[in-house]
Amino acid sequence: MTSERVAVESAKGVNGLEKIILRETRGSSAEVYLYGGHVTSWKNEHGEELLFVSSKALFKPPKAIRGGIPLCFPQFSNLGPLEQHGFARNKFWSIDTDPPAFPTNSSSKAHIDLILKPSEEDMKIWPHSYEFRLRVALGPGGDLMLTSRIRNTNSDGKPFTFTFAYHTYFSVSDISEVRVEGLETHDYLDNLQNRERFTEQGDAITFEGEVDKIYLSTPTKIAIMDHEKKRTFVLRKDGLPDAVVWNPWDKKAKAMADFGDDEYKHVLCVEAAAIEKPITLKPVVNLILRESSRVAEDPLLWSLYVQVS
Ligand code: TA6
């Protein structure tokens, strides 16, 4: 098969970092770097890029790639003792050659399973043993699906608690012509006002300046409408009650070395997240004991489905 028709291909990306290219039969594609388990590209069947990656993104560990879909785990933002947004996006992931059966088998072959487990070194930072399995898949219609399955493998029986987000950077034509529907009337914590709690007004959200809000207990579906391109992203999330909306605007854009001064005009982050109510996972009882007792805790399953209409 010539390369453009291979459903899953390993390649060298920026700075020689390994990436996986996914291709759907009708022409859509996606790319995910093993560094960070980081999706950096999602193109529709016309080859149009739907995610934003900064022209100044470094692709240089340990700095996270600026754009795409960084994974925020086990901590969102600075809501805890770990580095900003946790460490999953700064680690090298591996290809999961023997993933547990997937509850919903996608018909598309264009998918990859990655896995992240802590090293001894990592355990000094966050003293828990876990298996974080990420499946990145393209649906037959070109929608992008990310599913995270996180398992607590602590042998000491200790549960662990974490917060999480898919920190998705959507590419938009002009932020001043973008509307977000589905979050109106919901409460949010405003990161620009000491995370004070407010209630969103009745209309769709539009953008005239910096926004950094954590919307709470939000609907499964959120629509991001790009007026100029007549394009609507429909973000669908399962198991992720919250949603972060962020645009740095001009001042913050200038302050970020890995972000172009004017790039804020062409990006909007809408992030499926679990923040207000951190998730606590009990350990899976080990295999021997497990056979004689009920399964302690099935791995969590979260999916982010993003389709474009
Ligand atoms: O999700 C929004 C946010 O928490 C903002 O406050 C801003 O810090 C953004 O994430 C980017 O964070 P990063 O660590 O990737 O620069």
Image (cartoon, rainbow, N blue to C red):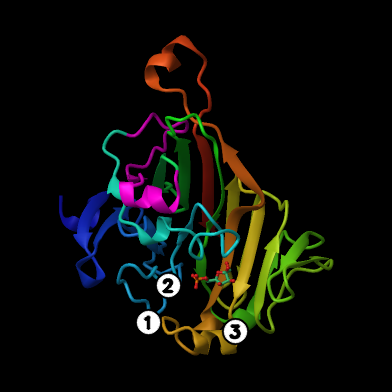
Residue drawn at point x = 42 percent, y = 62 percent = 44
Of the two numbered discs 1 and 3 on the same chain, state the one appearing first in sequence: 1
Residue most toward the left?
Answer: 1
Q: Given the image, on which type of amino acid does mark 2 rest? A: Arg
* Residue 28 visible in the shown view: no
Residue drawn at point x = 64 percent, y = 80 percent = 177
Q: Given the image, on which type of amino acid does mark 3 rest? A: Trp
Q: Position of residue 236 (x, y in %)?
A: 59, 51
Q: Position of residue 142 (x, y in %)?
A: 43, 53
Residue on which disc 3 sits: 249
Q: Given the image, on which type of amino acid does mark 1 rest? A: Lys
Q: Position of residue 150 (x, y in %)?
A: 47, 40
Of the two numbered discs 1 and 2 on the same chain, state the one appearing first in sequence: 1
Label 2's element? loop
Residue on which disc 1 sits: 56
Horizontally, is 125 left or right of 98 in the view? right
Magenta-drawn segment: 99-127
Q: Quadrant of residue 54?
A: bottom left
Label 3's element? helix
Of the two numbered discs 3 and 2 on the same chain, state the one appearing first in sequence: 2
